Amino acid sequence: MNKKILIQIFLFFIISFSLWVYYYFYKNTKLNDKVSKKNNTEILITDDSANVIKDIFYTSTDAFGNEFEIRAKTGKIKLSDPDLVYMNDVAAVVRMIDSSPINISSKSAEYNKKNYETKFKENILINYLDHNIKTNNLDLSFEKNLAKAYNKVEYDNNNTKLYADILEIDLITKNSKIFMDNASEKVQIIDKR
């Protein structure tokens, strides 16, 4: 009887060890392969406070079918606030239903993965049809359906060049408001015809 129990215990340990080896080496590797193929990003751990990511790509679609894509060469996620991604060399596209795409590029951006709010900074170029806007700051809010360009706004199209402090664009209606920070100053408009 002792011999029979010892054989059963030995077989039990061999089966348990085999299952553990199978799960740890085979299953765990397959899960990691799926994740890396889907995200196509490279994460480098630089210190205890932040992770650096290369070749970032996020996309989102709202309930109406409007799409937002944002790409960056590099980015940083702070462990203290993992919903915020601090990106560098950024390109974004806003595709609204029944509208041409809005292309945005900037030197840097702060992207919130939770609510998709994005704050573009430095050397921002916005292109929509024949409308071109240069600015130093752009806040894009999908909750408010509002784009707010500020800090040296320069608007240019085929006929007009415009200089202002603030430009607000309703993303749904495409209506815009252009104004200065100081009410005593005036928006400068140049007719190129």
Image (cartoon, rainbow, N blue to C red):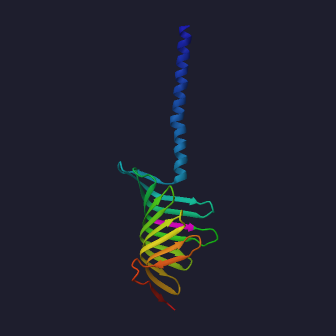
Q: Position of residue 13 (x, y in %)?
A: 52, 22
Number of marks in the rendered image = 0
Residue at image x 48%, y 80%? 155
**Dominant secondary structure (helix, strand or loop) of the stretch shown in magenta:** strand
173 sits left or right of 79 in the view = right
The front one of 85 and 5 is 85
20 sits left or right of 75 in the view = right
Q: Position of residue 129 (x, y in %)?
A: 57, 77
Would you place residue 80 above or below residue 119 in this image? above
Magenta residue check for 132? no
Would you place residue 84 above or below residue 179 in this image? above
The front one of 93 and 34 is 93
Residue at image x 52%, y 68%? 146
Segment colored magenta: 90-94
Q: Position of residue 10 (x, y in %)?
A: 52, 18
The front one of 1 and 62 is 62
The front one of 104 and 185 is 185
Would you place residue 82 above or below residue 144 in this image? above
Task: Please identify the residue farthest to the bottom as the structure is shown.
Answer: 193
Magenta residue check for 92? yes
Q: Position of residue 169 (x, y in %)?
A: 52, 73
Would you place residue 47 above or below residue 3 in this image? below
Task: Please identify the residue farthest to the top as the structure is shown.
Answer: 1
Task: Please identify the residue farthest to the right as the structure is shown.
Answer: 98
Q: Quadrant of the N terminus?
A: top right
Where residue 66 sits, quadrant-wise, is bottom right
